[in-house]
Amino acid sequence: MFRYERPQAGRQRQFHQIGVEAIGSSDPRADAEVIALASDILQALGLKNLRLDINSVGNREDRLAYRQALVEYLTPYKEELDPDSQDRLSRNPLRILDSKNERTQEIALGAPSILDYLGEESRRHFQGVQQMLGDLGINYRLNPRLVRGLDYYTHTAFEIQSEDLGAQATVCGGGRYDGLVEELGGPATPAVGWAIGMERLIILLQQLQKPPVPVVDFYVVSRGDRAEAQALLVAQKLRRLGFSADLDLSGSAFGKQFKRADRSGAGACLVLGDAEAESQTVQLKWLATGEQSAIAIADLLERADELRRRLDAARAAQAGV
């Protein structure tokens, strides 16, 4: 997708979304269900410090009445509003409530609440949504300033925000849009759904979750033509047995390769030089203890279960388990 507004951090010009659409039901249970699904997905990803804001924008008649009241309130402040909000005052005044301008936000605090302009049908729908969210154990905050400016939106509007994202805090946004299908030329069709911005979600996950450190079982060190060829075969055979093996391809001196082995986090180091290539052996060195012994390559591969136990024990000792 592409965004018209000025790009910002976490709000790129080109972006991708995943979303859910529940089409064909006007039941408030559909609203609660899609909100619960969004909450479950974000929590399953390990996100914390999330907040659900909900509001109702009512039906078309409710919104027209509220629009008139909002314009009457904002007009005396027109010169104090930011330029975008001044333009929206005649075109789309509900969007002024979304403004990030500090002075406009201060003015909007005193604006009438759309909840005071809901008709009986809209109130029943919104009360039903709130009741079901409570039954599901989903905490929420009423936010009368959360609105949708386009005419096809109706009733429930919601956002899930992260306190860890800064200014661009919204992770998921959605609501009911019963008028959309009809506006596009189709029959009157109720619908509710949401969208999650993938790039913003990735930014949040990167901030909150450290990337996993790859686990290396064996670091394979070699020097000399025959030894380097043999080292590749040994590393590949270990991988086929289910071990992870990091093969040093630098061809540098043993000392430099040993330093890289120490920094790799591997459980053990396998060393092959000309003598080992000749005798079909390797030097097996356990990096945590420094214990080292020569072992035939064939014996090494036959001792897979013993090696796994030693690796597990070494990692448990490192973790203090």
Image (cartoon, grey):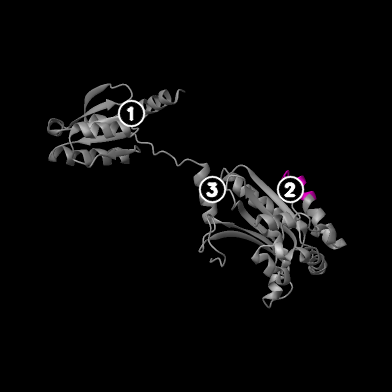
Query: Which residue was labeled with disc 2?
Result: 141
First-in-chain label (1 vs 3): 3
Residue occupying image coordinates x 52% and y 46%: 205
Residue occupying image coordinates x 53% and y 42%: 208
Q: Is residue 67 visible?
A: yes
Q: Of 85 and 42, which appears nearest the observer?
A: 85
Does residue 48 appear left or right of residue 72 in this picture?
left
Does residue 147 appear left or right of residue 225 in this picture?
right
Front: mark 1 or 3: 3
Disc 2 element:
strand
Q: Is residue 34 visible?
A: no
Residue occupying image coordinates x 69% and y 67%: 86
Q: Around disc 3, counting alpha carbons within 10 Å, would you say few (fewer than 14), some (14 to 19), or many (20 or more)?
A: some
Q: Amino acid at mark 1?
A: Leu
Query: Which residue was labeled with disc 3?
Result: 204
- Residue 144 in which image quadrant: bottom right
- Residue 215 in which image quadrant: top left
